[in-house]
């Protein structure tokens, strides 16, 4: 399979600060930019920011490139467009800074935020780091609400239940815990994995949950009895990530303690280079997609039958369930491993966007051009800028509260100890 190599431009993570400073003073601002294409010489320079006043009294922002073949166009306080004639011809791409930031003040150790989630109605955020403690914050003020203490290993996953008042967490201590987001109590602990848990999912309203681990198993749990309903033994190596999606539901009778599993499909990313689709109700593996290198992230667009896998060599493969033998499209930017994938719904009808996070801090949105059921091309349509060269640890999509937004809000975390909304 031919891998399409994308050129890209990196930009100073806090470029919005330099623009704001230039607008508030008479001193020009500047921020660095670099253009890259794998296997070719890179180009480095900076963008100078000045202001002027139009005939009607409007303040104008002027951007000019210095020492780099990069063109910049000011769009707004949080957005600009960049293009380049070096490192391959690059058409203008939108670059967006954070709309809001939640400072996770309780996370002070080296790896920053390992996992986080935002409640369904957007008022609360839960985040965990490498000290076994999770913390709940208000999204509007970053105010710390409560600590969830009980794990003795690194936090690897956390999710709000649909109510927004209960949290599911997992850690390297082999345990899942269910918490009250109000008072921090831990009424349920789920024990059974024999190696670190890597990812979780909540089934329907949350009477059942899923977990995956480095022991190569996917487990379906009943929270009320704290018991395993089924153990999917899928790999002799680690399961790195899962994505639970809903398809067509049926009216069939379910076993005792099993709820809302009909029509649910689990996409599974394995360290052994495979990605799997598992029918949660029938327990069958319905498709296997095999690559030559470890798969670190996965996202499944069930409506179109497209499966996206992120590999440790920086490649994103696009597969179809109709032809699982080989990818129908593949792309990469560099050799940095893919650390996270997330499907982002558009406000208007159309296929979702794919948000890609990498271990060198890149976060960007890709749109696919479809011809019938085939992928004709893919292009980067937006860069989300807040991270330097630290890994993207988590991406979540949530309903946007911005009037006229063209897509869902995207939340992302890394080693900065902050969670950013774009």
Image (tube, rainbow, N blue to C red):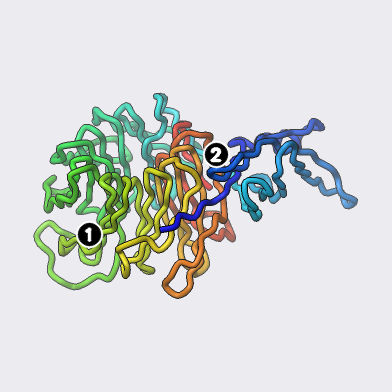
Identify which residue is drawn at 66% across, 36% down: 44
The correct choice, above or below, for 342 with respect to 110 in the image is: below
Mark 2 Cα-neighbour bin, 10 Å: few <14, some 14–19, many ≥20: many
Is 152 displayed left or right of 370 in the figure? left
Question: Mark 2 or mark 1, which is nearer the start of the sequence?
Answer: 1
Residue 16 at least partly seen: no
What x and y, as percent, mark residue 110? 40, 25
Please tell me whether mark 1 or mark 2 is closer to you in this view: 1
Residue at disc 2, secondary structure: loop
Is 119 displayed left or right of 64 in the figure? left
Q: CB of mark 1 within 8 Å of CB of mark 2?
A: no
The residue carrying mark 2 is 386
As drawn, the label of residue 278 is: 1
Residue in the foreground of this view, choosing between 279 and 181: 279
Q: Which residue is outermost to the top?
A: 109
Identify which residue is drawn at 67% across, 45% down: 77
The correct choice, above or below, for 32 with respect to 168 in the image is: above
Residue at disc 1, secondary structure: strand
- Quadrant showing the N terminus: bottom left
What x and y, as percent, mark residue 106? 40, 27
Q: Which residue is outermost to the bottom?
A: 372
Q: Which residue is outermost to the left?
A: 256
């Amino acid at each position: 399979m031919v891998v399409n190599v994308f050129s890209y431009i990196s930009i100073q993570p806090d470029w919005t600060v330099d623009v704001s400073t230039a607008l508030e003073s008479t001193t020009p601002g500047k921020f660095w930019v670099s253009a890259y294409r794998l296997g070719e010489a890179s180009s480095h320079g900076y963008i100078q920011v000045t202001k002027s006043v139009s005939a009607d009294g409007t303040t104008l922002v002027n951007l000019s490139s210095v020492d780099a073949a990069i063109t910049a166009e000011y769009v707004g306080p949080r957005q600009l467009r960049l293009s380049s004639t070096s490192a391959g011809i690059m058409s203008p791409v939108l670059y967006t800074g954070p709309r809001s930031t939640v400072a996770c003040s309780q996370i002070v150790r080296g790896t920053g935020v390992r996992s986080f989630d935002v409640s369904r109605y957007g008022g609360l955020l839960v985040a965990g780091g490498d000290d076994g403690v999770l913390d709940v914050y208000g999204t509007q003020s970053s105010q710390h609400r409560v600590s969830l203490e009980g794990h003795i290993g690194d936090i690897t996953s956390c999710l709000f239940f649909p109510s927004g008042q209960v949290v599911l967490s997992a850690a390297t201590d082999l345990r899942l815990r269910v918490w009250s987001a109000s008072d921090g109590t831990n009424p349920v602990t789920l024990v059974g994995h024999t190696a670190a848990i890597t990812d979780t999912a909540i089934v329907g309203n949350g009477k059942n949950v899923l977990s995956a681990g480095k022991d190569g198993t996917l487990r379906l749990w009943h929270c009320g009895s704290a018991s395993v309903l089924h153990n999917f033994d899928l790999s002799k190596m680690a399961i790195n990530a899962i994505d639970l999606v809903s398809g067509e539901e049926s009216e069939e009778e379910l076993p005792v303690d099993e709820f809302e599993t009909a029509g649910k499909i689990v996409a599974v990313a394995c360290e052994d280079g495979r990605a799997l689709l598992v029918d949660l109700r029938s327990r069958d593996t319905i498709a296997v997609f095999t690559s030559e290198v470890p798969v670190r992230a996965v996202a499944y667009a069930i409506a179109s039958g497209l499966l996206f896998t992120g590999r440790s060599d920086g490649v994103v493969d696009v597969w179809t369930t109709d032809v699982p033998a080989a990818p129908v499209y593949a792309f990469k930017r560099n050799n940095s491993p893919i650390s996270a994938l997330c499907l982002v719904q558009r406000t208007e009808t159309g296929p979702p966007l794919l948000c890609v996070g990498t271990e060198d801090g890149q976060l960007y949105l890709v749109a696919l051009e479809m011809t019938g059921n085939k992928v004709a091309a893919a292009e980067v349509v937006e860069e989300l800028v807040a991270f330097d060269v630290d890994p993207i640890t988590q991406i979540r999509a949530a309903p946007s509260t911005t009037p006229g937004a063209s897509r869902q809000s995207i939340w992302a975390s890394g080693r900065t100890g902050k969670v950013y909304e774009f």
